[in-house]
Image (spheres, rainbow, N blue to C red):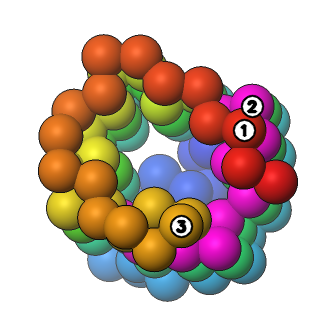
Amino acid sequence: MDANEVLRRYANGERNFREADWRGISLTNANLSGIDLSGAHLSNADLSDSDLSNANLNWAGLKGSNFNRANLRGAKMPDGRKHNDFLESANYFFS
């Protein structure tokens, strides 16, 4: 799945991207608020400057993912905790 397909499907109302394979995808500046990425493969993905507020990232593989300046307010992180802020810089190394 490439970035254009993701954005098209999201714009059409789809929010369930569980277990999606987004390894290496570039979705900078994307509005993905409320998306369900539980169990997704996001290693080396670039989600910098994106809105991932209230996203579900439980069990997602984030090794090497770039979330610089991403809005993760209310997002469920892989460790089950909720994130409550914007990130000035982040590089996740969860497997």
Under tag 3, what secondary structure?
loop
For badge 3, the amino acid type reads Asp
For badge 1, the amino acid type reads Phe
The residue located at (56%, 57%) in the rendering is 6
Residue 10 horizontal/vertical position (percent): 41, 65
The residue located at (74%, 58%) in the rendering is 61
Q: Foreground residue, 93 or 71?
A: 93
Query: Which quarter of the figure is the N terminus placed in?
Result: bottom right
Q: Is residue 17 left or right of residue 67?
A: right
Distance Cα–Cα, label 2 vs label 3 = 16 Å
Report the span colored magenta: 55-65
Query: Which quarter of the figure is the C terminus placed in?
Result: bottom right
Distance Cα–Cα, label 3 vs label 1 = 12 Å
Under tag 2, what secondary structure?
loop
Give the image quarter of residue 4: top right
Q: Earlier in the sequence, mark 1 or mark 2?
A: 2
Check residue 60 for magenta coloring.
Answer: yes
Distance Cα–Cα, label 1 vs label 2 = 5 Å
Q: Which residue is mark 2?
A: 64
Q: Is residue 32 visible?
A: yes
Q: Is residue 37 left or right of residue 15?
A: right
Residue 23 horizontal/vertical position (percent): 81, 46
Q: Which residue is mark 1?
A: 93
Q: Which residue is mark 3?
A: 79
Give the image quarter of residue 92: top right
> Measured along the vertical axis of the image, is residue 3 above or below residue 56?
above
